[in-house]
Amino acid sequence: MFLATFVAFLPMRLQYPPGIVLLVAAPVLLGWIAWDHGSWIFAAGLFAFVSMFRNPLIYFYRCARGESPKVPT
């Protein structure tokens, strides 16, 4: 979460490379959390993940549906 907070403070044009790395790494880390700590902690982590990455997740969801959403600048 600290890295995601740091990335959020960057200007939008500099957020993409580290943000993509965090977005790809999150499912692996959430799986590890679920394995070690159980489903309630996993649910809290999943809630935090969706909260922090809601705009990229909405963008990828719309792309998957065949829409052409605009990328924020």
Image: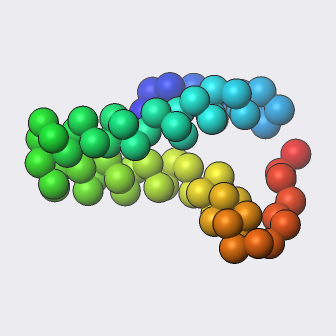
Q: Residue at x 11, y 48 (%)?
A: 38
For the residue pair 64 and 38, the one nearer the viewer reads as 64
| Residue 35, image quadrant | top left
Q: Where residue 3 sits: x, y (%)?
A: 50, 26
**Which of the two residues, 29 or 6, is positioned nearer the viewer here?**
29
Do we see residue 56 in this rendering?
A: yes
Q: Is residue 20 above or below residue 65?
A: above
Q: Is residue 63 shown left or right of residue 8?
A: right
Instruction: Give the residue displayed 37% in from the left and 56% down from the top.
Output: 47
Q: Position of residue 54 (x, y in %)?
A: 57, 57
- Colour scheme of this structure image? rainbow
Eyeballing the image, is 67 above or below 1? Answer: below
Q: Please state if 32 lies on the left or on the right of 16 as rendered.
A: left
Q: Position of residue 64 (x, y in %)?
A: 67, 66
Identified at 66% across, 58% down, the residue is: 60
| The C terminus, quarter of image | top right
The answer to which image quadrant residue 6 occupies is: top right
| Quadrant in which the N terminus appears | top left
Q: Is residue 9 left or right of 70 when viewed as pictured?
A: left
Residue at point 63%, 26% (across, down)? 18
